[in-house]
Amino acid sequence: MELEGAQKAVDDWINNHGVRYFNELTNMAQLTEEVGEVARIIARRYGEQSDKSTDLVKDLGEELADVIFVTLCLANQTGVDLNAAFEKKMKLKTERDHDRHHKNLKLKSPLKR
């Protein structure tokens, strides 16, 4: 599904199953909360923090999907075409960073864990 289709799917879901979009500030707070949940999973599974029993059942994919869902809500509410914005960002990153990472000596050494 392209981002345009994802934005429409979220809008359809809001219109058919939700009452309305939460306001932008509420959605921003919700996005922050969802990113925090992703951070918690990453910190415990791939970082140095130990797992708690409640963390073991958390689904990283589901939490990442929550981040995407709320991001799509914010884009819809604010009139952002994420397809166009993402294409513009990829073009910018490609032009700006084409050789940058290949020249980064820090990336040539193995990842330290």
Image (cartoon, grey):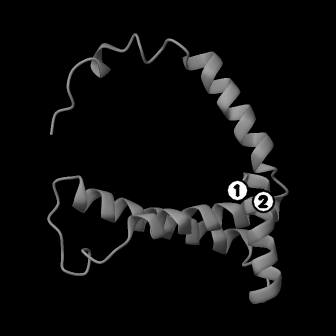
Per the image, the residue denoted by label 1 is: 1
> In the rendered image, is residue 18 in sight?
no
Counting the numbered discs, the total is 2
**Callout 1: few (<14), some (14-19), or many (20+) C-alpha neighbours within 10 Å?**
few
- The C terminus is located in which quarter? top left
Residue 87: image tag:
none
67 versus 47 height, above or below: below
Tag 1 secondary structure: loop
- Mark 2–mark 1 distance (CA, rounded to whole Å): 6 Å
**Callout 2: few (<14), some (14-19), or many (20+) C-alpha neighbours within 10 Å?**
few
* Horizontal and vertical percent position of residue 7: 76, 62
* Horizontal and vertical percent position of residue 64: 49, 62
Tag 2 secondary structure: helix
* Horizontal and vertical percent position of residue 47: 21, 52
Say whether marks 2 and 1 touch (CB < 8 Å): yes
Q: Quadrant of residue 85?
A: top right
- The N terminus is located in which quarter? bottom right
Per the image, the residue denoted by label 2 is: 5
Residue at (74%, 75%) from the top-left corner?
Answer: 23
Identity of the amino acid at label 2?
A: Gly
Q: Quadrant of residue 98?
A: top right
41 versus 91 height, above or below: below
Q: Quadrant of residue 60?
A: bottom left
110 versus 33 height, above or below: above
